[in-house]
Image (cartoon, helix red, strand yellow):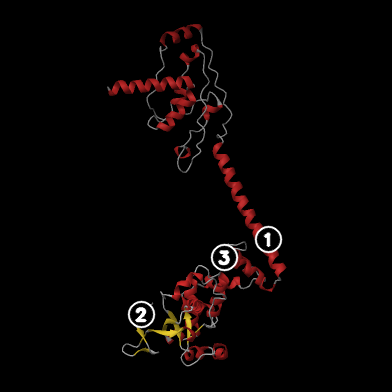
């Protein structure tokens, strides 16, 4: 960083053998020929470097660099006082563009221990940049992996997974035109997404295909994705519609016809019949009575199917019994509907009442309960 110790002479701090920062003429700071970035992009965000350098650059000596790539000697064109910038190539270019005469540089030849270590140092800085596109990253990763005998050894040494490496290799199997579209998409423009491009690169034999062949494979891949999305939406709508529809009620069972009674038996039964019908106390379960109508035999709606954050569209309430004539109301026997209800289960009880009583009867029952509660609380 710019706060590192600064010396005027090249080399390391002899006291602790640690790299130190020093001011080096901008003209003596050479760009890294192995920089993973194809283009440095817009440098206007670094215009302030003309007056102040906020972060130092990392460099190696030309001798350390040429031990790794002696074939770059003519390309590098380094002098005795020059250094090769490993991290900070955009800062170097901005200093040159905006007229800064010196740069604060940390020269550390240990970064050039091997080709892999120098390439990884350059890659790490660029990967942190938002405009480092995936094709540049893929090229850098493949170049680093090539420094090892196998991809497995590269993955273990660099801390990458083999699948992570394979995903980036797949991008480089695509035609340059498709790679251009991947880069465009990464910049927020129209193009091919990274995920789709990686899947396309995993198609068997894709590398040997022409642009037309790869484009055809891409269209098939996109169509398959669209079909899958449409199928998921249709299944979701179908499930939603099924949840809204009331359960299909079974056909009503014919009520058993009672045996004919003699006039004397009828008279005796009339004399002993109670004046009113009371709801029975909870008893041991008994066989379900024959339903009075198809709606009455509908299963109670479970509490998980009612309105909640997970179910914003509850199922409809059970249909209520139609309003019966006055003379029939007195003879209606609600125990046929309420006899098997768990009276401590409020939801089940409410469903049974709605199926058994008409709307008017249910409202009158609610009023009576409210009055009873008010009277009891007073």
Residue under the point 57% across and 91% down: 74
- Tag in front: 3 or 1: 3
Specify few, some or many for label 1: CA neighbours under 10 Å numbering under 14, 14-19, or 20 or more.
few
Instruction: Tell me which numbered mark, 1 or 2, is placed earlier along the sequence.
Output: 2
Q: Residue furthest left?
A: 378
Calculate the distance from the C-alpha at mark 1 to the C-alpha at mark 2: 55 Å
Please provide percent x and percent y for residue 277. 41, 17
Q: Secondary structure at mark 2?
A: loop
Residue that carries the numbered disc 2 in the rendered image: 4
Nearer to the camera, 111 or 225: 111
Residue that carries the numbered disc 1 in the rendered image: 220
Calculate the distance from the C-alpha at mark 3 to the C-alpha at mark 1: 22 Å
Q: Secondary structure at mark 1?
A: helix
Nearer to the camera, 221 or 268: 221
The answer to whether residue 187 is seen in the rendering is yes
Please provide percent x and percent y for residue 144. 52, 80
In the figure, residue 57 lies in which quadrant? bottom left
Nearer to the camera, 337 or 168: 168
Instruction: Tell me which numbered mark, 3 or 1, is placed earlier along the sequence.
Output: 3
Q: Secondary structure at mark 3?
A: helix
Residue under the point 48% across and 9% down: 266
Using the image, tell me which numbered label, if any, was put on residue 186. 3
């Amino acid at each position: 960083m710019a706060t590192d110790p600064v010396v005027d002479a090249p080399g390391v701090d002899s006291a602790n053998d640690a790299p130190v920062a020093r001011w080096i003429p901008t003209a003596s700071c050479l760009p890294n020929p192995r920089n993973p970035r194809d283009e440095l992009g817009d440098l206007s965000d670094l215009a302030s470097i003309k007056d102040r350098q906020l972060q130092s650059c990392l460099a190696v000596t030309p001798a350390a660099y040429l031990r790794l790539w002696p074939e770059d000697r003519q390309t590098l064109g380094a002098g005795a006082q020059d250094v090769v910038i490993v991290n900070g190539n955009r800062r170097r270019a901005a200093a040159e563009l905006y007229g800064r005469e010196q740069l604060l540089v940390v020269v550390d030849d240990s970064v050039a221990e091997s080709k892999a270590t120098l390439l990884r140092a350059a890659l790490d800085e660029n990967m942190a940049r938002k405009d480092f596109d995936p094709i540049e990253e893929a090229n850098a990763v493949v170049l680093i992996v090539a420094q090892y005998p196998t991809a497995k050894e590269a993955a273990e040494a660099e801390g990458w997974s083999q699948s992570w490496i394979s995903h980036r290799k797949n991008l480089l199997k695509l035609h340059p035109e498709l790679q251009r579209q991947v880069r465009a998409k990464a910049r927020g423009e129209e193009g091919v997404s990274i995920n789709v491009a990686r899947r396309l690169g995993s198609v068997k034999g894709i590398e040997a295909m022409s642009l037309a062949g790869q484009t055809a494979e891409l269209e098939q891949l996109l169509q398959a994705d669209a079909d899958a999305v449409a199928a998921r939406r249709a299944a979701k709508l179908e499930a939603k519609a099924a949840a809204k529809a009331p359960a299909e009620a079974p056909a009503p069972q014919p009520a058993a016809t009672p045996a004919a009674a003699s006039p004397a038996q009828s008279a005796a039964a009339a004399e002993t019949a109670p004046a009113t019908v009371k709801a029975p106390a909870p008893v041991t379960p008994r066989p379900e009575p024959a339903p009075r109508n198809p709606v009455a035999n509908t299963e109670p709606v479970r509490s998980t199917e009612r309105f909640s954050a997970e179910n914003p569209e509850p199922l409809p309430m059970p249909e209520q019994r139609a309003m019966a004539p006055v003379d029939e109301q007195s003879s209606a026997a609600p125990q046929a509907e309420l006899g098997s209800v768990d009276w401590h289960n409020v939801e089940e009880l409410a469903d049974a009442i709605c199926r058994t009583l008409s709307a008017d009867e249910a409202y009158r029952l609610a009023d009576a309960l409210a009055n009873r509660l008010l009277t009891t609380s007073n």
